[in-house]
Amino acid sequence: MDDDAAERRCAAVDEAMNAWGDAVYRLAYARLRNRADAEDVMQTVFLRLLRRDEPFDDAGHEKAWLLRVAVNCCNDLHRSAWSRHRAAGEGVPEPIADDDGALRDIWEAVGSLPEPQRDAVHLRCGEGYEVDEIAEILGVKPATVRVRLHRARKALRTMLGGTRGHR
């Protein structure tokens, strides 16, 4: 690769980090519940982007690819010997700052959900993806995402004490 191509590729990665870095980090942190691990995953994701040769169809395709790679990197980290032999993570993810505490309570409850449900809720509510997009990112069927979201809503209602007016 010549110097101009390398500079263009680095500039494209910088641009992607500015656009999608926070989303990649939030997803990794929501899954891993550890800042250092989330930062490692984020670094790995953007190194893979640097090595990627194929262009993206559009910005949405790029973001979805980055989040899918982040999920895969988190899965790899969960399976690693290092992960199995160390202490538990450092707490509950806080993807959204909140002054009055109400939203913080909700996200703390989301953080206590099983990982598959937590991922689905994070991608739906935290990142704004639709069910089909979440399914593609997580590598599951849309029906699986709907079930995970349904179970998450039911568990959150129980945890947060609200049962009235919900299906």
Image: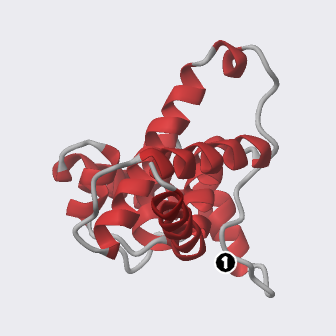
SS of the residue under disc 1: helix
Residue in front for this viewpoint, 32 or 5: 5
Tell me where residue 159 sits by quadrant.
bottom right
The C terminus - image quarter: bottom left
The number of numbered discs placed on residues in the rendered structure image is 1
Residue 161 in sight: no
Residue in front for this viewpoint, 157 or 118: 118
Residue 77 in sight: yes
Vertical side of 127 occupied by 34: above or below: above
Vertical side of 16 occupied by 42: above or below: above
Residue identified by numbered label 1: 103
Vertical side of 8 occupied by 117: above or below: above
Give the percent coordinates (x, y) of residue 103: 67, 78
Give the class, few, some or many, for how many residues have Cα within 10 Å of label 1's Cα (few <14, many ≥20): some
Q: Quick check: 86 left or right of 150?
A: right
Q: Residue at x 77, y 49 (%)?
A: 35
Give the percent coordinates (x, y) of residue 66: 43, 56
Residue in front for this viewpoint, 79 or 105: 79
Q: Residue at x 55, y 56 (%)?
A: 27
Give the percent coordinates (x, y) of residue 62: 36, 64
Q: Quick check: 66 left or right of 13?
A: left
Q: Quick check: 164 left or right of 83?
A: left
Residue in front for this viewpoint, 81 or 117: 81
Q: Residue at x 29, y 65 (%)?
A: 61
Colour scheme of the rendered structure: secondary structure
Residue found farthest to the bottom:
99
Vertical side of 159 occupied by 76: above or below: above
Q: Residue at x 51, y 37 (%)?
A: 73
Give the percent coordinates (x, y) of residue 20: 52, 69
Residue type marked 1 = Leu
